[in-house]
Image: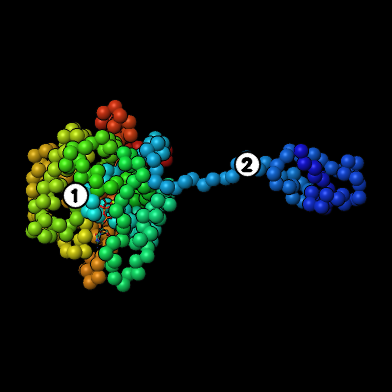
Amino acid sequence: MNKSCSNPDCTVAQTGKCLLNHSLDACPSLVETVSASTPPAFGLPPVLAAPDSNVRLPPSLALDRDLAERLASKRPCTQVGILGLPASGKTAALVSLYLLVAKGLLEGFDFRNSLSLMALEKLSRGARRWDTTSLPDQLTAHTEIADNRTAGYLHLRLHSTRHGFDLDLLLPDLPGEWTKSLIDTNRTDRLAFLKSCSAIWLFVDGRKLHDNATKQHALHRCEMVLRRLKAYLGQIVPTITVVATHKDYGQLTSSIFDPLLGLAGELGIDVRIHQIASFAQEHSTTVAGEGIAELIDGLCLSVGDQRWFEAERSGCSRSIGDYRGGEV
Ligand SMILES: Nc1nc2c(ncn2[C@@H]2O[C@H](COP(=O)(O)OP(=O)(O)OP(=O)(O)O)[C@@H](O)[C@H]2O)c(=O)[nH]1
Ligand SMILES: [Mg+2]
């Protein structure tokens, strides 16, 4: 218990001396208050007891599976499966998206919230140091994750001004090795999360499609991913967007992608092509971030198709209906 005085002018709490020179035990105005770690101000008891432990802010690092599941159980979330070989531009696209959002330049979207701000900040540190006079060779580092079996999620809540609703994005920044081992050895054990994705982005370095020496190989690797996904996901393959990066090195003619679209037709899956420039090299007619807003807008089409996280466990394809009318 602490002692304080009901006389508002008394400073006994600060000085330990009674204003009217009473001994502390004999003062008629002295009251005992519930103990609190902070001393009562101006002789009055504190309104609230101090919290037991230090206040902690939410961690704001990449969300682990449990946190992502908890979020998805409260609000409809759009989880995107992000695949692509090493150095295809996956992380760069996430960085570009974050920087556009941070500057209020993502056309058609307003920032609402992020539960993984620290992780996004950390990813984009290299790009922030870019002095804009010339593009350095590397703006993002090769992705390595602590646990090589589970993905961490970046979270962004964006408001679509065109559609009038919020989009909760869960975006895993995966290392390219996961896609490489899917192609080479059909390793799928750590890709179970794809079963609860509303969309898949398959990244390919656009420069490889420009160059005749590498074009066929790059297309063949993409075709392999499509085949593997169809075999693994069966009837529940979501729309796959093939994202060709490095548009700042030149726009690709759409006929380059005909073999991929032909294969998609054979496999009975929905494949779209999209070109982006996450960054822009000097003298390019393309601006940094070109195509990113459209990539996100493409996700708005599938908002009625968010899948429950449980889908991957039960193996079923249960979908969340479109219930954007009310906040969850
Ligand atoms: N100019 C330009 N550079 C890009 C573009 N996309 C990616 N880059 C650069 O290409 C390099 C590889 O990009 P990342 O995003 O790190 O590749 P990643 O797919 O995440 O690679 P892993 O993490 O190894 O799987 C980085 O140096 C990027 O800065 C783009 O559209 N234009
Ligand atoms: Mg990466």
* Rendered position, 151 above or below 111: above
Q: Residue at x 21, y 42 (%)?
A: 181
Along the line of sight, the residue nearer the viewer: 93 or 46: 93
Along the line of sight, the residue nearer the viewer: 65 or 108: 65
Residue 104 visible from this viewpoint = no
State which quarter of the image contains the C terminus: top left
Callout 1 crowding tier (Cα within 10 Å): few <14, some 14–19, many ≥20: many
Which x, y percent locates residue 246? 21, 60
Disc on the earlier residue, 1 or 2: 2
Mark identifier at residue 51 = 2
Q: Is mark 2 within 8 Å of ligand 2?
A: no
Q: Point out the quarter of the image occupied by ligand 1.
A: bottom left
Which x, y percent locates residue 85? 21, 49
Which x, y percent locates residue 317? 25, 31
Residue type of the residue flagged with mark 2: Pro
Residue 263 visible from this viewpoint = yes
Residue type of the residue flagged with mark 1: Val
- The residue at which mark 1 appears reads as 242
Q: CA distance from mark 1 to mark 2?
A: 51 Å
Query: Please, which residue is most extreme toward the top here?
Result: 314
